[in-house]
Image: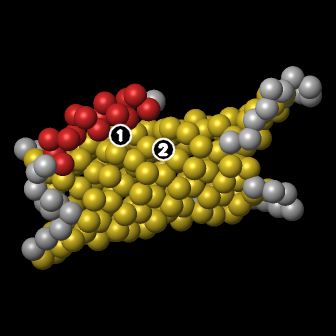
Amino acid sequence: MKYLFFTLLLLSLSSFAARDQITKGSYIGGGFNYGLVGLTPTNQSESNFKGWGGVIEVGTNLELTTNFGLNLAGEYKFSEVNNTLKSDTYMEKASINTGTAKVGFYYGATTVGVGYSSTDVEVKNVSSTASSSTVSFKGSPILYYANYGFEQRGVRSVIEFQYSSGEFDDVTYKDMTIGLRLFVLF
């Protein structure tokens, strides 16, 4: 996954030298991100996961005044992350799938906003000394995001930071990601 991330980075470098403002109109695309996830069951210590994932996004920018407007988007994010604590006899892997509706404001090349997510987390643990198990959580965390974009010839490159948190049944969920996205404008 990280090799694909760096390939996308190289492909989008020409956009980084381009115009640093967002234009009105719709877009579709995707990219890769690196995330840190914390899961804290009630009365237990936090389990931290990290790993690579992908994202698909479609949205539109509505210009309100020159260089200022509203960003509306929907995204689907998926990732496979590993627990940062592992041993020779035990490891955990989490699959995270998130659908998010986002709304934000852009000014120039910068966009900030919030989103409402539907997140499914499935944690699988494997042990050579005990039986393996799978635990699933579902919830609707609030997402906060900020990004910076560059455009050239109908293509937009975006570096985006996201933070989301919420309560899933008896588990506190936190997710922080940084990613690179490439969009086609239409």
Side (left or right) of 77 relative to 154? right
Colour scheme of the rendered structure: secondary structure
Q: Is residue 63 above or below residue 15?
A: below
Checking the image for residue 108, the label placed there is: none
Identify the residue at image location x=60%, y=38%.
Answer: 81
The outermost residue toward the right is: 130
Q: Quadrant of residue 31?
A: top left
Side (left or right) of 52 relative to 88? left
**7 or 94, which is in the foreground?**
7
Mark 2 or mark 1, which is nearer to you? 2
Type of amino acid at the residue the image marks with label 2: Tyr
For label 1, the crowd category at 10 Å Cα-Cα, with few meaning under 14, some 14 to 19 and many 20 or more, is: many
Side (left or right) of 105 relative to 123? left
Identify the residue at image location x=9%, y=74%.
Answer: 66
For label 2, the crowd category at 10 Å Cα-Cα, with few meaning under 14, some 14 to 19 and many 20 or more, is: many
Q: CA distance from mark 2 to mark 1?
A: 11 Å
**9 or 58, which is in the foreground?**
9
Question: Could you say where residue 23 lies in the image, as x and y percent from the top left?
Answer: 13, 60
- Assign a secondary structure to mark 1: strand
The outermost residue toward the top is: 128
Q: Which residue is mark 2?
A: 34
Q: Is residue 177 above or below residue 134?
A: below
> From this viewpoint, is residue 184 visible?
no
Checking the image for residue 31, the label placed there is: 1
Q: Quadrant of the N terminus?
A: top left
Q: Is residue 114 above or below residue 17?
A: below
Question: Could you say where residue 132 lies in the image, as x and y percent from the top left?
Answer: 84, 28
Type of amino acid at the residue the image marks with label 1: Gly
Question: Could you say where residue 163 lies in the image, as x and y percent from the top left?
Answer: 51, 61
- Assign a secondary structure to mark 2: strand
Question: Could you say where residue 10 lies in the image, as x and y percent from the top left?
Answer: 25, 35
